[in-house]
Amino acid sequence: MGAILGISDEILAAIMPVVVYWVNAWMYMALGSSCEKYRLHSKKDEDKMNLVSREAVIKGVIFQHFLQVITALLLFLTRGSGNDDGASAEQPTSIYDIPKQILIAMVVMDTYQYFLHRFIFHNKYLYKYIHAQHHRLVVPYAYGAIYSHPSEAFLADTVGGSLGFLLSGMSARTSIFFFCFITIKNVDDHCGIMHPWNPLHLIFRNNTAYHDLHHQLYGGKYNYAQPFFVMWDKILGTHMPYSVVKRAEGGFEVQLEKDYKED
């Protein structure tokens, strides 16, 4: 159980999320005009409102993936999950334990990212020199999901995912699916498309529209929670109620409740 197709679980856990990221992002881009009627923002708004070029976003994401892979490999090496013959030293995980471990990892990551995200946003220095880079994508798109300052990418995504992995006690093999699931969810949250049959939107209240609102100027101090649940926003009063309605010129838009419009 230490390898799949001759590749160790640890290497797959480090590499597969990167592959899944670009395949998933390419899928959204390939859909192109067929999803225009489900977009939260028009293509014109995307080109006009964003403050960073697509080329810069691609370069930034590639660099972050490089750091992510190196950190993941070091994590597994430090954990000492392998032995002399290259097989996994972990005991087989019961199929009944896997859902529990993944749920624990999701809650751990959500909790960590909420408080880090909120702290960075409210610290003027950290926002200006670190978090503001991610918000240069006012109208997010799929392959820009993890575009951010390298320091934030490491602290939020890499450390957050590592904590979920370590505290849940999951195996390297289980982590392949967990890290790939995080990646799929993160790309979807930034894709800007509210397709009515998207299963992630049916399962999670924290979805494309929820996070898109946080990227807008009026929603920056709300909806910090990511990537799975909305519980911390609800508990700590940073949840911004909204509804998704059809836009007159086509597609959808996020419509805020009246009280928030007047703030």
Image: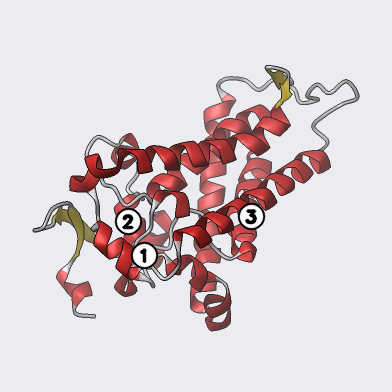
Gap in Å between the C-alphas at discs 2 and 1?
A: 7 Å
Percent x, y of residue 131: 52, 70
Identify which residue is drawn at 41% across, 71% down: 51
The quadrant of the picture occupied by the N terminus is top right
Pointers 2 and 3 in contact (C-beta within 8 Å):
no
Position of 195 compared to 139: left or right?
left
Name the amino acid type tagged 2. Tyr
Q: Nearer the viewer, mark 2 or mark 3?
A: 3
Residue farthest along the left direction in this orientation: 248
Which badge, 1 or 3, comes first in the chain's sequence?
3
Identify which residue is drawn at 45% across, 59% down: 54
Residue 256 in the image: above or below residue 174: below
Quarter holding residue 244: bottom left
Identify which residue is drawn at 37% across, 43% down: 29
Gap in Å between the C-alphas at discs 2 and 3?
A: 27 Å
Residue 167 visible in this rendered orientation of the protein: yes
Binning the other alpha carbons within 10 Å of mark 1 as few (below 14), some (14 to 19) or many (20 upward) gives some
Identify which residue is drawn at 18% across, 46% down: 37
Pointers 2 and 1 in contact (C-beta within 8 Å):
yes
Q: Which residue is mark 3?
A: 63
How many labels were placed on the picture? 3
The circle drawn on residue 201 is none
Name the amino acid type tagged 1. His
Q: Nearer the viewer, mark 1 or mark 3?
A: 3
Q: Which residue is mark 1?
A: 214
